[in-house]
Amino acid sequence: MSGRRSKVWLHFVRKDNGSAECNTCSKLISSKGGNTTNMTKHLRLHGIQIKECTVFNLFRQSPSTSQPPSSSAVVPAQPTPSTPSAEPSQSDESLRSRSCAATTAQANKPVPARVNPFTLAAKGKMTVEKREECHRKVTAFVVKRLHPFSEVEAPTFRDMLFTLNPNYIPPTRDYLTNHLIPSWYEIEKSNIITELSEVSHVALTSDGWTSIAQDHYLTVTAHYLVEGKMRQKVLQTKAVYKAQTGIVIAEEIADVLTDFGIFDKIVAVTVANAANMDVAIHRLQFVKLGCFAHTLNLAAQSLYSLAIMSQWIAKICVLVVWIKRSSMAKTVLQEKQAILKLPQHSLILDVRTRWNSLHLMLERFLEQYPAIQAASLDQRLRKPMERDRLARFTDEDLRRAEDFIRLMRVMYTSTLCVSSEKNPTSGQILPILKKLEMHFTVTDGDTVFVSNLKKQVWGNLSKRYQSDEIRSFLEEATALDPRFKQKMDDNAAVWDRIKGKFLAKNLTDSEKQMHPCKTPKMTPLEELFADEDVQKLLLRTLRPGGGT
């Protein structure tokens, strides 16, 4: 068997002319170069199957003719009783023939299949209910994980499903796109319409954005309460191919609200501080709230207009970009971080359209400042930095970064506070603005750099939310928020306004509920003083600081 490790040689005798003789039918089969493929195919005619013995051999590429064939095993469980020598003699032919015949007879016996979930699934035909359930799971996999629709036609994906259940045939891309996803969408939309029909008040958030392919989209999201818990549903994200004027946006939003039957239930709409959005919401005659997180970001971006800030930020940005583009600079910086025992963090680059990115860039710059200084003095970076004329940082740059982080940290925290979709945030706006006003008030101990930052930021924020309608809305939202209802300057007047609105809207309905046409449980005395009882109950309920 020297040089012939494949067990296919148990059924053949090698000849000198590059062929092998079958022990069963004495037919000569070509085996030039030690290739056993033809002999394996020939054995199948006699019912003898040769298979790989290990799972990982399935991933192995076909060996070339110069390499020995991989080891394989015969399907029958028991090995052949006798093993022929490498050069069998003519006297051994009878013994070999009997051995081959015994092996063939054993191979023809039915081998019981292993019982496992896959063999059990292959026995019975998949029911309609099971197939539809599999379709739903595949659709959810594609939709919720944002996979491309072509994923269902990928060979590896279909092979995986075939392995899990050979009876299941996954949907095609066309069936997924034109049948499964639209059907699921219609059902979900119907469920949302049914749920919104039982809601009396709805708040909206809407924004427009442009994809990488330069397609403009408009998204409308509804926020409402169900059993005291906030819920939010994206009603629609629709491509808009018209000019993004306020009139067009108003028509698009109105179509969505009418489609879901909530046009008359809108309390307020939160949008970005864009002029076309302002025109759209006023055209719809809704209460418009500018996105507070976006407002804070605009105030932070106004710092770029300061000459003292723009030059200093530009110097830091140039260094960050240079380190990010240089593989050697990155390596040296990591070495210095390890020596100084600093966190192995990469530098962050400021992007104006990304909220708080300026704060995060300077915060990371301040954290890695010792490593940056040590890297700039390294011989491997000194010449490249001098060649690119990168400015070196001084102690004044470090002091400015510390002052900036200390001053602007509250802006970053405020953004995180109002960036929530599971809790109401409109009641936080006025308390946060009041705190920011105190924080950005110029004091005698401020440096010129800090005082300029304070004036610029608060000068931008002080112009926001000055409309009487918006101010009243925010005051009422703050008063109704249990966390801030006692922190209003004119708390009594706000509560009087809330009581008046509540009584005007709900007193009539409450009277109808308390005065049915025929109420056998109500005594004449209760009926006589029912109006007074309702008013007292409402006033006790709305009393500041607690209930009855």
Image: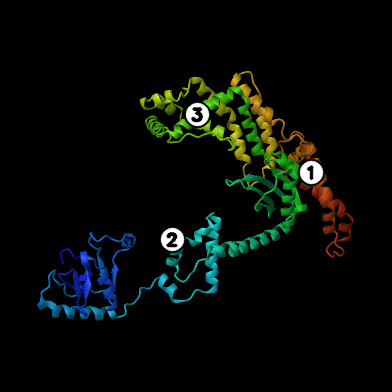
Residue 17 appears left or right of 412: left
Q: Nearer the viewer, residue 46 or 364?
A: 46
Left or right: where 305 falls relative to 333: right
Foreground pick, 233 / 107:
107
Measured Cα–Cα span from mark 3 to mark 2:
45 Å
Earlier-in-chain disc, 3 versus 1: 3
The residue lying at 25 percent from left, 81 percent from top is: 105
Name which residue type carries label 2.
Thr
Of labels 2 and 1, earlier in sequence is: 2
Q: Residue 125: x and y, percent?
A: 48, 76
Instruction: Check residue 156 in the rendering and tell me which mark sits there, or answer none.
Output: 2
Q: x, y (%) of residue 482?
A: 69, 43
Residue 229 place in picture, x, y as percent: 66, 52
Q: Quadrant of residue 16?
A: bottom left
Q: Nearer the viewer, mark 2 or mark 1?
A: 2
| Mark 2 element type | helix
| Above or below, 322 relative to 173 | above
Q: Residue furthest front?
A: 17
Q: How is the image coloured?
A: rainbow
**Looking at the picture, how far across and down is residue 182, in whole percent?**
62, 62
Alpha-carbon neighbours of circle 2 within 10 Å: few (<14), some, or many (≥20)? few
The residue at which mark 3 appears reads as 318
The circle drawn on residue 498 is: 1
Q: Is residue 74 visible?
A: no
Mark 2 vs mark 1, CA separation in Å:
62 Å
- Binning the other alpha carbons within 10 Å of mark 3 as few (below 14), some (14 to 19) or many (20 upward) gives few
SS state under label 3: helix
Q: CA distance from mark 3 to mark 1?
A: 54 Å
Kind of element beneath mark 1: helix
Q: 382 left or right of 99?
A: right
Amino acid type indicated by mark 3: Val
